[in-house]
């Protein structure tokens, strides 16, 4: 699957997770159009796209909810956790 790569449009902590999902689990990343949020597309195409926050603290509730959303869509984070 051809995919965009995350850049400076999102924070490094989010970028590390997105890059890991793309490289090891077959996910895809799409840049936002028209000023919206970038999207993370699960390898299982029956799952909905996940909005990637542009900024935010990794210690906050939003980050943990985002990681949980990834897990519900079939992603594994942190690496090694099943």
Image (spheres, rainbow, N blue to C red):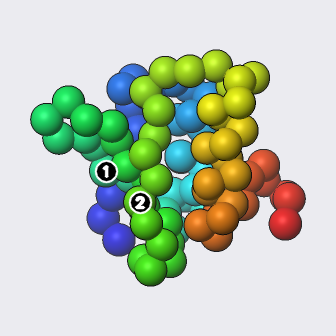
Q: Is residue 2 above or below residue 6?
A: below
Q: Is residue 55 above or below residue 41?
A: above
Estimate the x, y position of residue 21 in percent, counting from the top left. 58, 56
Q: Residue at x 39, y 31 (%)?
A: 7
Report the disc number at residue 46.
none
Disc 1 marks which residue?
A: 30
Disc 2 marks which residue?
A: 49
Q: Nearer the viewer, residue 30 or 61?
A: 61
Q: Are marks 1 and 2 in contact (CB under 8 Å)?
A: yes
Q: Residues within 10 Å of mark 2 (few under 14, many from 20)?
A: some
Query: Is 14 on the left-hand or right-hand side of 79?
Result: left
User: Which of the 4 image quadrants contains residue 23?
Assistant: bottom right
For the N terminus, the quadrant is: bottom left
Q: Residue at x 17, y 41 (%)?
A: 33
Query: Is 14 on the left-hand or right-hand side of 34?
Result: right
Q: Secondary structure at mark 2?
A: loop
Estimate the x, y position of residue 20 in percent, counting from the top left. 61, 50
Hey, which residue is sitting farthest right in the picture? 81
Given this view, does label 1 or label 2 mark the residue nearer the observer?
2
Q: Residue at x 31, y 50 (%)?
A: 30
Query: Is 30 on the left-hand or right-hand side of 61?
Result: left
Q: Earlier in the sequence, mark 1 or mark 2?
A: 1
Give the Cα distance between marks 1 and 2. 10 Å
Q: Secondary structure at mark 1?
A: strand
Q: Residue at x 57, y 34 (%)?
A: 14
Is residue 31 in view from this perspective? yes
Is residue 4 in view from this perspective? no
Estimate the x, y position of residue 51 in percent, counting from the top left. 43, 45
For the C terminus, the quadrant is: bottom right
């Amino acid at each position: 699957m051809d995919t965009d790569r995350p850049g400076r449009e999102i924070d490094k902590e989010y970028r590390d997770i997105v890059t890991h999902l793309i490289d090891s689990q077959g996910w895809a990343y799409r840049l936002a159009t028209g000023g919206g949020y970038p999207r993370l597309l699960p390898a299982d195409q029956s799952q909905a796209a996940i909005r990637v926050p542009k900024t935010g603290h990794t210690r906050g509730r939003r980050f943990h909810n985002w990681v949980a959303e990834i897990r519900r869509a079939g992603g594994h984070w942190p690496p090694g956790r099943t």
